[in-house]
Amino acid sequence: MITLFKGFLVLLVAIPYSILALVSIPLDRSGKTYHMCARQWSKFILWIFGVRVSVKGLEHIGKGSVIYASNHASWFDIPAAVAGIPDDIRIMLKRELTYVPIWGWALRYGPYIAVDRTSPKDALRSLDKAAEQIRSGASVLLFVEGTRTRDGKLQAFKRGAFVLALKSGVPVVPVTINHSFRILPKGSLKIRPTDIEIIIDRPIETSAFAGRDGEAALMKEVRSTIERNLVEPGGLEV
């Protein structure tokens, strides 16, 4: 009952933040106000469920646009990354989230990038939109596995982040999110408050990579970095 009540509060608080985010879209074309609303709501979600976030590697965040390439183990990865990474970020997220009333509308019309994972053409258009956001000065966050892991282990990576990296020419920053799998694994409704650790690694310059071979080599380097920093849950019952 406590979890349901907290969930209701999160949805209730989402309404004014979503309305404010929607209003900000025509008033602030940069998207910074929109992202500020997302950060505040994310902090509220983490606070009400008793989840603390620590961030290592803040020295690797510079002034220019980058692509953050992260693993994905839990729904809580999104608020943790939004609240924990002090950068003007645009998230690439699944289109299904935009169907939620009010909150989803803010996602649909805002600067975050919705992706229809069933349509290759739509996915390409989403990458073009992400490239536009990068040219405007923002950074983009992608969960490179495409969907949440079911066992806490790192899954195969999708090409999108690396196609975008070579297309836009900006550095890729590997991001490792640890311990979030324990909070809310995929397929589970039980929330277990756990501290999340985010590790931001050094940016990888993309100028030396080109073509499909370059995408594969860049993907391999990012995966190696995340694997090195990842702490797998091991034996968690969901």
Image (tube, grey):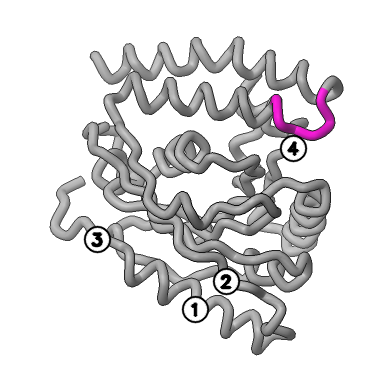
Q: What residue do we see at 54% from left, 17% from top? A: 14
For label 4, the residue is: 111
Residue 120 position in % (x across, y down): 73, 64
Closer to the eye: label 1 or 2: 2
Spatial separation of the CA atoms under disc 1 and disc 4: 29 Å
The amino acid type found where label 4 is placed reads Pro
Label 1 vs 3, first from the N-terminus: 1
Q: Which residue is mark 2?
A: 204
Task: Determine which of the numbered discs, if any, sits on residue 232 in the image.
Answer: 3
Residue 120 on the magenta span: no
Q: Which residues are magenta?
A: 28-33
Amino acid carrying mark 1 in the image: Glu
The span from disc 4 to disc 3 (Cα, nearest Å) is 32 Å
Q: Mark 1 highlights which residue?
A: 221
Indicate the secondary structure of the residue bearing disc 2: loop
Tell us which disc is closer to us: 1 or 3: 1
Badge 1 vs badge 3, beta-carbon distance below 8 Å: no
In this rendering, would 84 be left or right of 35? left
Q: How many marks?
A: 4
Q: Residue at x 45, y 39 (%)?
A: 84
Nearer to me, 151 or 175: 175
Q: Position of residue 227 (x, y in %)?
A: 35, 70
